[in-house]
């Protein structure tokens, strides 16, 4: 297997990655509904809906019929999200009641519902356009936690343009299947370590510098590819597994930041953490397999000359995108 096997698919993925900043402001970002019990059957509500400009998606949280507002919703538009906060009293509580999001079936987004109860337990579920209603069980099952956090892991990695672009750059550098296996394994091991350490509170790293360095890691790989083409192979070409492991530690902190926004069920933190990581790995595997298979197909269709000509443009595009991310993320420090 050679590097050129991957070039064809890179055209498709590069176009998709270039479009992500636009689509992120639209429907690809998930909504978030949190109900936190402060007193018996009294809940504070946080309702976050993706917005584009001053327009939010037409999504509406529908609480159980026994719930009534104790305060009027306070709305704000923050970071391309429409956020409402208010307090409700639910005479019958939330257990064995239905919570739904109307309008979800007309979108391409999901909504994470998180419930925190006064006894310290919590429940989380991901509502989708095909399943927009949640019947709250009396007790969260292990299957619910496993399914929810696995899906969150999959969607996070597949919607994470920077993580995918880093993996894709590694695929351009690695020139045989055995080295690819070692490289992806090293990346997986590294980000699993820091994801667990940061989530469990053993290590804390500010999120903004982490995101900037993740962008810098992609730029580094793009430069390594250019140097290799010019007959000056660097560390990434010689020891791709080492580079993948080092930068994988940083990517793990990025995954931990995303998981921190979602939160973990206090009664099942290890289970949720494990299956979020499983979801990340499944999403990453889906991406890698897709790149390899479609690239191989294009190679067999004799598009090699065209793909070779596109190589330089693609590599410089990766460098340009990552450079923009570096400046953008450093500017918010």
Image (spheres, rainbow, N blue to C red):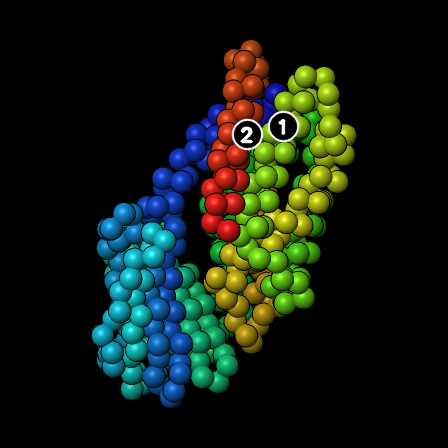
Q: Residue placed at 24% from the left, 55% from the top?
A: 58
From mark 1 to mark 2, how far is it between C-alphas?
7 Å
> Which element type, helix, strand or loop, lies under badge 2?
helix
Residue 67 in picture, x, y percent from top left: 26, 79
User: Is 140 above or below relative to 296?
Assistant: below
Residue 135 in picture, x, y percent from top left: 36, 71
Q: Is residue 275 rendered to the left or right of residue 261?
A: right
Q: Please identify the residue farthest to the top as the structure is shown.
A: 305
The residue tagged 1 is: 223
> Which element type, helix, strand or loop, lies under badge 1?
helix
Q: Which of 69 and 121 is in front in this view?
A: 69
Label tally: 2
Q: Looking at the image, can residue 301 be seen?
A: no
Q: Residue placed at 43% from the left, 30% from the top?
A: 15
The residue tagged 2 is: 319
The 10 Å Cα crowd at callout 2, few under 14, some 14 to 19, many 20 or more, is many
- First in sequence: mark 1 or mark 2? 1
Q: Is residue 286 rendered to the left or right of residue 111?
A: right
Q: Please identify the residue farthest to the right as the structure is shown.
A: 238
Q: Residue placed at 35% from the left, 85% from the top?
A: 41
Q: Nearer the viewer, residue 278 or 217?
A: 217
Q: Is residue 59 rendered to the left or right of residue 145?
A: left
Residue 212 in picture, x, y percent from top left: 55, 45
Q: Looking at the image, can residue 83 be seen?
A: yes
Image quadrant containing the N terminus:
top right
The 10 Å Cα crowd at callout 1, few under 14, some 14 to 19, many 20 or more, is some
User: Is 191 above or below relative to 19?
Assistant: below
In contact (CB < 8 Å): disc 1 and disc 2: yes
Which quadrant of the structure image shows residue 115?
Answer: bottom left
The circle on residue 48 is none
Residue 86 in picture, x, y percent from top left: 29, 74
Which quadrant of the structure image shows residue 233?
Answer: top right
């Amino acid at each position: 297997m050679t590097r050129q096997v991957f070039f064809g698919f890179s055209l498709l993925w590069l176009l998709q990655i270039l479009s992500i900043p636009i689509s992120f402001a639209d429907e690809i970002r998930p909504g978030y509904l949190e109900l936190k019990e402060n007193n018996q059957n009294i809940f504070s509500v946080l309702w976050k809906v993706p917005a584009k400009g001053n327009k939010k998606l037409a999504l509406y949280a529908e609480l159980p019929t026994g719930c009534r507002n104790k305060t009027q919703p306070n709305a704000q538009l923050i970071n391309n999200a429409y956020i409402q906060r208010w307090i409700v009293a639910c005479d019958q509580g939330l257990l064995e009641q239905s919570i739904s999001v109307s309008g979800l079936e007309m979108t391409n987004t999901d909504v994470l519902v998180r419930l925190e109860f006064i006894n310290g337990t919590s429940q989380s579920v991901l509502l989708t356009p095909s399943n927009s209603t949640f019947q709250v069980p009396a007790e969260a099952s292990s299957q619910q936690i496993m399914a929810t956090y696995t899906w969150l892991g999959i969607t996070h990695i597949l919607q994470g343009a920077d993580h995918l672009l880093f993996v894709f750059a590694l695929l351009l550098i690695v020139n045989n299947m055995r080295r690819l296996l070692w490289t992806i394994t090293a990346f997986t091991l590294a980000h699993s370590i820091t994801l667990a350490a940061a989530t469990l509170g053993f290590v804390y790293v500010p999120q903004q510098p982490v995101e900037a360095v993740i962008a810098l890691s992609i730029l580094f790989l793009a430069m390594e590819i250019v140097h290799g083409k010019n007959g000056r192979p660097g560390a990434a070409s010689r020891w791709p597994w080492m580079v993948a492991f080092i930068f994988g530690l940083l990517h793990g902190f990025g995954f931990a930041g995303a998981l921190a926004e979602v939160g973990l069920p206090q009664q099942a933190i290890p289970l949720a953490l494990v299956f979020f990581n499983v979801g990340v790995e499944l999403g990453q595997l889906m991406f890698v397999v897709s790149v390899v298979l479609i690239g191989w197909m294009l190679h067999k269709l004799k598009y090699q000359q065209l793909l070779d000509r596109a190589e330089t443009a693609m590599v410089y595009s990766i460098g340009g995108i990552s450079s923009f991310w570096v400046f953008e993320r450093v500017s918010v420090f």
